[in-house]
Image: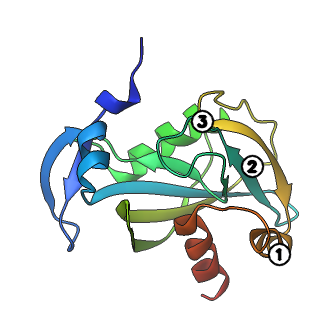
Amino acid sequence: MYNPGEEIIQIVDRENQEIEALPRRIMRAEGLIHRACYILVFNDMDELYLQKRTDTKDLYPSCWDVAAGGVVLAGESYEDSAVRELAEELGVNGVVFRPLFDHYFEEDDNRVWGRIFSCIHNGPFQLQKEEVAHGCFMAVADIFELSSREDFTPDGIEILRKVVNT
């Protein structure tokens, strides 16, 4: 049976230089800096796919998330991670990724170097039941309004602000 806590994750330092590879459970328990990919999925009407995380996620359970994605495994590039994560979470393959920027985020229990990508896909999606409870396309302005009244992943909403302001 698959256990995400045993995935071997790439650990990095504050300059995003590789240090070691450790199981995800140790990375979370010790608050180690790691890498992640974030994929903003837009449709042809420039709406963003917003997803609700399941209540079993190890970080930010039941929060809204503006990006598909996840941790970069040891020996994996950001780009390979983005392809893998988009296929796993949303069932999307064969899209063209547009790299946007790298971003460092730090909060009490989450320190991460992320590479942000965007792509265009109109659905349908095949949601990964362990990670995504449900989702929908929404205008970016409406996402910001919703974030004032509901819980969002703080790294995701920070990234979306940066995307909008660049």
In the rendered image, the residue lying farthest to the bottom is: 165
**Residue type for callout 3:** Glu
Residue 26 at what x, y percent from top left? 23, 41
State the SS at label 3: loop
- Dividing the picture into quarters, in which one does residue 39 lie? bottom right
Query: Is residue 93 in sight in this rendering?
Result: no
Residue 88 at what x, y percent from top left? 56, 32
Q: Which residue is mark 3?
A: 131
The residue positioned 65% from the left and 32% from the top of the image is 91
Q: Is residue 14 above or below residue 80?
A: below
In the picture, measured across the screen, residue 47 lies left or right of residue 108, that is right
Q: Which residue is mark 1?
A: 145
What kind of colouring is applied to the model shown? rainbow
Q: Which residue is mark 2?
A: 121
Ranked by sequence position, the earlier of labels 2 and 3 is 2
Residue 8 at what x, y percent from top left? 25, 35
Query: Is residue 123 in sight in this rendering?
Result: yes
Label disc, if present, on residue 105 of the rendered structure: none
The residue positioned 61% from the left and 78% from the top of the image is 163
- Dividing the picture into quarters, in which one does residue 40 lie? bottom right
**Residue type for callout 1:** Glu
In the picture, measured across the screen, residue 18 lies left or right of residue 42, that is left
The residue positioned 34% from the left and 31% from the top of the image is 5
